[in-house]
Image (spheres, grey):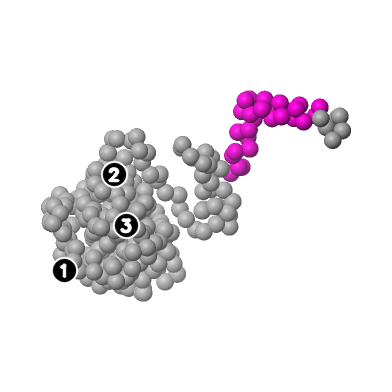
């Protein structure tokens, strides 16, 4: 090693230490398009190119964030509005925001991968508030399922999706290893033919229309608008009962549902009620 290198190495070491003390090193810890996660590594910006919702990424809609651990308000009105007897229209894109939702049934469910079709079938038969799938519960009524006393809540979501994680948090109920029952009423002034019930669920579940199971969504799914769709159906004149069952092992839990026509356009010429 020549004399120039011998003198140059100590100078390089000093420059690196000095730069780190000034915080220059932090510039190398954040990749463009990322934002630092709270108390942890950076998290990718979902709106960036190739990310969910970005160019080249899968079709996903922006969803409300999971409540922070230090948020202790547990307010139902943060994400929901208590339903009124006045019938409600679907939103501008046809999404159903009004549902009767039962307090979560606590289950020994450790992960979402266990939500198979067989698992769902067993849950529907053994942990059911009623085997009559056209039953519409009363708001604020109480029912016992699997030895647990649970309450029905009629709520309108403030967003196009119905976030069950936020509902459980607001009501101070379990958020993991849970099973939800939901019911809503679709009111039609005439028959609406050739429609499909389209849904996206996190993590798994099923939907019924007028007592007939029209969608089954097993496995560990993520919420994607119109991720699955039923065969062609008819919404009859008068009341149509939609029932949903949503299961969650771990993590976020929410769903979206709407009716679309045979051209995949939203159906909106109906109203929604909880009775």
- Quarter of the image for residue 275 reads bottom left
Q: CA distance from mark 1 to mark 2?
A: 29 Å
Q: Residue at x 13, y 52 (%)?
A: 149
Quarter of the picture containing the N terminus is top right
In the image, is residue 193 above or below residue 221?
Answer: below
In the image, is residue 69 above or below residue 181?
Answer: above
- Secondary structure category for the residue under label 2: helix
- Secondary structure category for the residue under label 3: loop
Residue beneath disc 1 = 132
Q: Residues within 10 Å of mark 2 (few under 14, many from 20)?
A: some
Q: CA distance from mark 1 to mark 3?
A: 29 Å
- Taking depth in this image into account, of 160 and 33 the one nearest to the observer is 33
Residue beneath disc 2 = 169
Q: In front of the other: label 3 or label 2?
A: 3
Which numbered disc flags the more N-terminal residue, 3 or 2?
3
Q: Residue at x 71, y 26 (%)?
A: 14
Q: Is residue 204 visible?
A: yes
Q: Residue at x 18, y 66 (%)?
A: 126
Give, as a single range, the part of the protein colored magenta: 7-33
- Taking depth in this image into account, of 245 and 122 the one nearest to the observer is 122
Q: In front of the other: label 1 or label 3?
A: 3
Residue beneath disc 3 = 110
């Amino acid at each position: 090693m020549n004399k120039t290198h011998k003198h140059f190495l100590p100078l390089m070491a000093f420059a690196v230490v000095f730069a780190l003390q000034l915080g220059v090193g932090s510039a190398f810890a954040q990749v463009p398009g990322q934002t630092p996660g709270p108390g942890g590594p950076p998290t990718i910006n979902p709106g960036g190119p190739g990310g969910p919702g970005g160019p080249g990424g899968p079709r996903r809609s922006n969803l409300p964030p999971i409540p922070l651990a230090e948020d202790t308000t547990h307010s139902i009105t943060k994400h929901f509005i208590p339903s009124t007897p006045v019938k409600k229209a679907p939103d501008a894109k046809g999404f159903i925001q009004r549902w009767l939702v039962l307090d979560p049934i606590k289950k020994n469910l450790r992960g979402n991968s266990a939500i198979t079709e067989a698992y769902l079938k067993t849950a529907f038969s053994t942990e059911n508030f009623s085997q009559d799938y056209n039953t519409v519960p009363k708001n604020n009524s109480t029912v016992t399922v699997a030895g647990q006393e649970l309450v029905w809540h009629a709520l309108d979501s403030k967003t196009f999706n119905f976030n069950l994680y936020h509902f459980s948090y607001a009501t101070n109920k379990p958020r993991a290893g849970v099973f939800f029952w939901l019911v809503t009423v679709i009111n039609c002034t005439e028959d609406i033919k050739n429609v499909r019930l389209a849904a996206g669920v996190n993590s798994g579940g099923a939907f019924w229309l007028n007592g007939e199971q029209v969608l089954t969504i097993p496995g560990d799914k993520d919420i994607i608008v119109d991720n699955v769709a039923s065969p062609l159906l008819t919404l009859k004149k008068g009341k149509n009962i939609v029932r949903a069952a949503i299961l969650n092992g771990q993590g976020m839990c929410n769903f979206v549902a709407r009716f679309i026509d045979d051209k995949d356009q939203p159906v909106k010429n109906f109203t929604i009620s909880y009775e």
